[in-house]
Every structure is written in C-alpha cells, then in structure tokens.
Amino acid sequence: MNIALTLPDGSVIKRPAGTTPAQVAASIGPGLARDALAARVDGAAVDLDVPLEQDAELAIITIDSPEGLELMRHSVSHIMACAVGRLFDGVKFGIGPAIENGFYYDFDVDGAISADDLERIEEEMARIVAEEIPFERVEMNIEEARELMRRKDQVYKLELLEEIEDHVLSLYRTEGFIDLCRGPHVPQAGKVGAFRLLNVAGAYWRGDSARPQMQRIYGTAFPTEKELEEHLERLRKAEERDHRRLGQELDLFSFDEEIGQGLVLWHPRGERLRQVIEDYWRRLHAERGYEFVRTPHIASEKVFRRSGHIPKYEDMMYAPLVIDEERYRVKPMNCPAHIKIFQTHTRSYRDLPIRYAELGTVYRYELSGALHGTVRVRGFTQDDAHIFCTPEQLVSEVEDLLELVEEMMGAFGYEYSVYLATRPEVSLETAGDEEWERATESLRRALEEKGVAYEVDEGGGAFYAPKIDCKLHDALGREWQGPTIQVDLNLPKRFEVVYVGEDGREHECIIVHRAILGSLERFVGGLIEHFGGWFPVWLAPEQVRVLSITDEHADYARRVQQRLRAVGVRAAVDARNETMGYKVRAGTVDKVPYLLIVGDREVENGTVSVRSHEQGDEGPAPLDEFLDRIGREIAEKRLPDDF
RNA sequence: GCUGCUGUAGCUCAGUGGUAGAGCGCGUCCUUGGUAAGGACGAGGUCAUGGGUUCAAAUCCCAUCAGCAGCUCCA
C-alpha cells in the first residue's frame, strides 16, 4: 500500500507505507540525505527513522532552519552529558536544553567541574562525534522508566518522572548515557556541527535556592566552524564594549573595596558625561512645566510605614539608623517626600497638574551576586518625577510623557518598544477593580491618541500600578529596561493626597510616578555599551583634543583650546613631548571624537588640521569653521552615522 | 545570598615553597617630530586582608573582603 506525502513545496510523492523520512530524504537527493537531522510529520517533529504509515505532510529538518539548529544544539548537550558521564564517576544528570545561542546541561558531580575540565570534556565530545555514536530512541512506560532511573541512581530524573503524566514516554540513549527526552534528535553524533564549551557555573536544581546546586556547563554550537568563530567573535566584541572595562579604560568611574560594594565613584570624566545628560534632562523637564525639588537622603521610618514600603520592601531597605531614639531609614525612593511638599498647601484643581522632578539618589539592598558594574548597584540616582493631577488630566499628562520619552530616547539613539502592563494577579486590593480599570484605560487611551504602537503585557504591571514600560534596543540588539510611566494607586490613599475640586470638595489626587532614564548609573552603563565608548560629540566627556606638533605650537594649541572652551566645548591640549603618531594614538585610545593637529602651517594660517573619529584625517580647516561645525553638531545632538 | 573561579606595580599579566618579574603607563634626559606607539635611563610592590603550616610562604591550608561567571531558558 502506498501513502501520499506532501512536501513543503506542495508537491506530493507516493511511497510504500512504512517508509522512513530518512529514506524519503535519500530519494530526493544525496545532499538532503546527508543534511537531514529529523523530520516534521503533520507538524510534529520526529526522528528520521520513524516509519510513516499514512498520508501526511512531510518536511525534512536540516541544520539550516532555526528548528534544526535548536535540535542540533540539544543533541550536542546530550553528547556533552555523555562525555561527562564517560569522564566522571557517579554523575547525576539534571536537565540540558538548547537555549538562545547555545545549550547547557546541569550535572551533580563530586567536587566541581573546573574550567580546565571543559577542554577534556570537549575532547571527549569530539571522540563521540568521530565515533558517530547513534542516538537511539527508546520508548517505555513510566514504571519501566522509573525502574531504569532508580537502577542508575538518577535522583533528579526520578523527580522529573514524578511530574510526568504520560504513560508511555521516550528516552534517548547515546551509548551509556540515557536521558528522558521528547526528541527528536540527530540520528548519530557525527551529524552535529561545530561546538565549543564556554563556561561552567553553579545553578540551583530547578532554579530554587533551597535545592542542591549543580554544575552547569554552557556551550554553543553552529552548523559550521566558520559560524561558530563568528559567534565567538561577536562575544569578544561585546566584551570589548563592556561598560565595566570601558569605565576603567576611559577613566569614567570605579569601585573601591573600602567604600563598599555596589557604590559608584564617578571620576571627572564620568561625572562630565553624567552632567551633560542631567543638564539635558533638566532643560527638557523645565520646558514641559516640571519644577525641581530636593529631598533628604534619610527620613524617619514613620513615613515609610505609612507609604507601605516597610511592610512590603523591607528586605530591600537598609537597617534603621537611630537618631534621638527615633528610627530613620536611608531612602529607597523619593515619592513620600514629594508628596509632603505637595501637601504644604491646600491645592486647588486650578493648580494642577503639578509636576515635581528630582534627580534623587536612593539606596537599595541588592544581593551581592546580583551587582554588576554600574548597571546593578546599591546606590543610584533616579530621574524621578511625580505628577499630581486630576483624573481628567491624566490622559493628556501621559501623552505629554510619551512625547518626552520619544524626544529623549531619540537623542541617545535608542529605538524602543512599548508595553502596556496591566494589573498583576497579586496586586493592591485597596484600589478596586474599577480604579485599576480606569487607570489602565487612561494609559491605553494616551497610547492610542499618540498613535504609539504597543503590546499589552497582561499582568505585568506593578503591585500598586498599571504602567507603560519601554524597552530600549541597543546597538548590539539587546534590550534594556527603559522609561516607565506608572499610575500610582497606593500612595494617594495612604497619604490622603487631595485637591479641592470645582465643586469645593476634596478629591483624591492622581499621582503618576515616572522615570525616563531610570537610574543614571544604569543608563550611563547602558550608553557606554550602546556606543562602545565612542560617544556622540554632544555626550563625549572630552570632545576635542588639540595636539601640538612641537613645543613651539603649544601656545597656539592653548589658544585654540580657549576658543573652544569659550563656546562651551570640552577641549584638552596634548602638548607632551611626543611624536604625532603617539599623540594621535593616545587620543584615539581615549576615544576623543575630534583631534585637532596644529603645527607651523596651522599657526600661520589660523587653521586646525581636523582628524575625526568617523572620517579620519580631514585636512586643514579655518578654526572658525570648525567652531561652527562642532557647535552645530552639539546643538543637533548629532549621532554617529550608524545610529 | 549560594556554587565555582580569580585577586602580584596605576593598567594587562607572568611567576606555584628558597633574594619579586615583563609590557604598557608614569618621571628624567636625548630627540622637535605632520595623523594609531622614536630612543636611553629611572622611580614604582606590606604579592587583597587576617590567621595557620613550615627552617623558609606571593606560592600550601583556613577565614574575611572584593571582582568575575551563573543561579531567567525545564521531561
């Protein structure tokens, strides 16, 4: 009896029942036979040797598809597990999935797996590949599987089996290593591409810090050695952009053991960068009717009890300071203080909206292992603001915010995507369904009115607020937490924040809590990586460096510096007794966007010889012309060409 | 916080029981130079901190502190 197989191109072929996908692939061509890893039959992924018994849609999976790549990586994780089983005694296996860009496998072994072991494991894997060890699918019922894993003393697999309901399940055997697995897998180890083990780290069994910690080995695999190399090259490139590395190389910030973990020391260059950002931030906020306030770093615990932060977030707050027998806390947020300022007067609806902004430095406890450069720290500066408004004003306030977000993020060359995050499952109950609904609707309306494309993040809101979250896409294609706009449903009630309405009665105020940059520390860290340290001119800590060719040109160089400084350009002079090549290199290593070389010709003609990061040597230009040009670039916040 | 790795000059790193090293940077001198490293000489170290083992510790052991990777991807 023949069955009809429909191929992805729509053609139909007839084959005897019992034909396997491998045979079909072979009949189509030797190339496909060689590249085939698995098959898709009526949408379900299966092994190549599964007999086809009835009419079906059939697609051969090769390494060139995302699906094939993932499958191959998963198979490599099994090969790695097999190798680890060969090399170490009494290994207990956890799980080993394919992940984005690679795979991992968790092992429980005596002692630890070291970075040196990775090489041995890789070599063993290479042998397994060379031996073309087959991947054998074994089906058994759950009792047999349990018996097997009991016999092999695979406690983690037994635990996983506890949770499986299917009666018949599949296992894959790669020589001595047999693993519960849905499959499919490559037919034999020789079919996998180029792989590399990357690192080993601890990982809790099932991500639970109460459970045993296992050794997780991460690896990556690609169809070809070339693609693998390209990927490793990308990893190296990302490392070169690491803000921690650039922060040191460019002398932007540091940390010090005696100062404490997660506390940033901003050096002059880093602080200059920050101030440029802050000045820009202040200007935009002033233009949009914000008023600036400043509030203390510590406050009586009373206020944080009232705000609800102590009961909810005490774990993240620092221990109390006792002052005159009263307990104080280092502030973890600025909101209560802004509310107190609001409440120093009776507010009429005529006064609203009131927008208070503060670059407020707050301190929060983060697990020591979670700290990361300036991106995850224990003390950071929020670009915080609270908008006090009437319900009627809410939509237009949010619209205004969306404009602000667009303007600011554009200036830094960020694209971003927008999410409307709705009420989470566990959420503040003092605000009723209706209130949650109203606030969420206002956010939605503002997005619609502004024509902002957004996705709904169902249940992704804060405990106390629906919000609009923006995720920034950086130059390396990664995502960063960006601007957030939250309608606070908690604080107005707790602090009884009210205004007098047209009707002469008190009404509860709406408080919008928002941050555009988030934390200055994190934002600057992200910017460093986004630009790889080559900041656009408007941001660069040192915008211009004037290089004198010999001692005789030092005075002219300093005059040029003065002219630049007079128009607000951050300029330095390198009059060191060194060669031009040396100074040009130094300026390049320091990532200064413009180097101006001055020698006899320039002194004589009142020019500067321009070397820009983007163009290289541009030749001489009259100083006035250069002043115009850089002034324009700074005013326009011109971004590098590839942004 | 947990697991593993790491901590030597300002930076990057070598040194693995027996007198502390290199390159870069820094200083001085020579050199006065035209777009990514000119030459010579020199200064610079409680080898993260505190204990321990040893005739002897940067090196071995313990603790502490800090940094790095991961702890999110699930049969």
Image: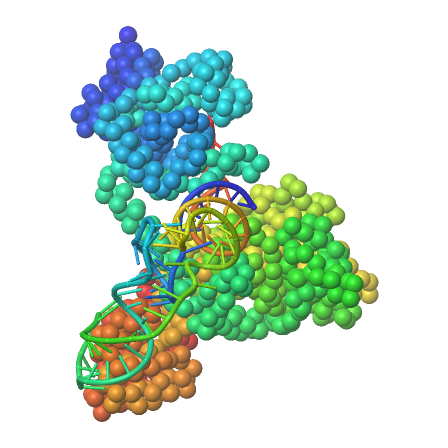
Looking at the picture, how far across and down is residue A493, in whole percent?
75, 55
- Of residues A281 and A438, the one nearer the viewer is A281
Above or below — where is A181 with respect to A377? above
Judged from this view, the residue extending furthest toward the bottom is: A604
Q: Which residue lies most toward the top here?
A: A1
For the residue pair A279 and A253, the one nearer the viewer reads as A253
Residue A56 visible from this viewpoint: no
User: With A190 as the anchor, is A630 left or right in this view?
Assistant: right
Q: Residue at x 17, y 25 (%)?
A: A30
Q: Quadrant of the N terminus of chain A?
A: top left
Q: Considering only vertical position in the picture, is A430 above or below A360? A: above
* Rendered-image quadrant of the C terminus of chain A: bottom left
Q: How is the image coloured?
A: rainbow
Quarter residue A24 falls in: top left
In the picture, measured across the screen, residue A407 lies left or right of residue A50, that is: right
Between B72 and A174, the one nearer to me in the picture: A174
Residue A1 seen from this side: yes
Q: Is residue A525 left or right of residue A76?
A: right
In the figure, residue A622 lies in which quadrant?
bottom left
Residue at point 64%, 59% (across, down): A332
* Image x and y of residue A426, in percent: 66, 42
Position above or below: A355 against A625: above
Q: How many marks?
A: 0
Residue A473 pos. (x, y %): 43, 54
Q: Position of residue A269 (x, y in %)?
A: 43, 72
The residue under the point 67% across, 69% down is A296
Q: At 60% across and 57% down in the image, what residue appears?
A: A364
Tell which of A414 and A576 is nearer to you.
Answer: A576
